[in-house]
Amino acid sequence: MSKPLSERLSQFTPDGSSIDRDALLFAAGRASARPNRGWIVVVGALAACQVLTLAVLLPRTISPTERQDSLAIRNDLEEVAPAAPPDASELGALTRQFLAGKDSDVASPGAVANLVPSDPPLTSLSASTLAEMR
């Protein structure tokens, strides 16, 4: 009689000399990855925009005559005395004039006195409160 099939199959031994498992998995991984070069195009476009922005926004060189003109204007502006801060007595007079409101050029405080509406404020009601009200 012949040997059962399971015994005959158990006699086979694998021959590992022809297949390199690591090389096979590495090749399969490289083949499965699609090259996505879209990000390279996006990065290149952003870099080109940055270069264009710098070229537009960088200050141009100033000729010596323009530099002298700008220095003359700056010197003229520096010669004008800065405005002195208002005196405390003037601030008090302005405050009294504002509060008086009749003869002043400033708007009267009565025009802004009633800032609160006369209607009752809105309230939030829950579902249980609405059920109780019915």
Image (cartoon, rainbow, N blue to C red):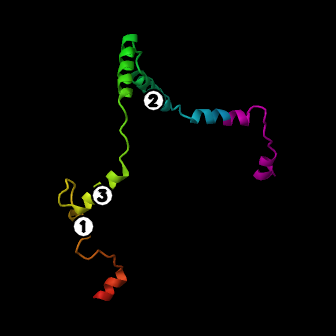
Task: Say if mark 3 contacts mark 2, CB within 8 Å.
Answer: no
Please tell me which residue is depicted at 57% across the width and 35% down the height of the picture: 33
Q: Considering only vertical position in the picture, is 64 above or below 75?
A: above
Task: Say if mark 3 contacts mark 1, CB within 8 Å.
Answer: no
Mark 3: amino acid: Thr
Spatial distance from mark 3 to mark 1, Cα to Cα?
17 Å
Spatial distance from mark 2 to mark 1, Cα to Cα?
56 Å
Residue 56 colored magenta? no
Residue 43 or residue 87, whichever sits in front: 87
Please tell me which residue is depicted at 62% across the width and 36% down the height of the picture: 29
Q: Which mark is residue 46?
A: 2
Q: Earlier in the sequence, mark 2 or mark 1?
A: 2
- Quarter assignment of residue 92: bottom left
Q: Which mark is residue 113?
A: 1
**Quarter placement of the C terminus:** bottom left
**Which circle, 3 or 1, is nearer the viewer?**
3
Residue 118 or residue 68, whichever sits in front: 68
Q: Which residues are magenta?
A: 1-25
Residue 113 or residue 100, whichever sits in front: 100
Element type where label 2 sits in the image: helix
**Residue 93 in the image, given as x and y percentages of width and height:** 29, 55
**Which circle, 2 or 1, is nearer the viewer?**
1
Mark 3 — residue?
A: 95
Please tell me which residue is depicted at 22% across the width and 74% down the height of the picture: 118
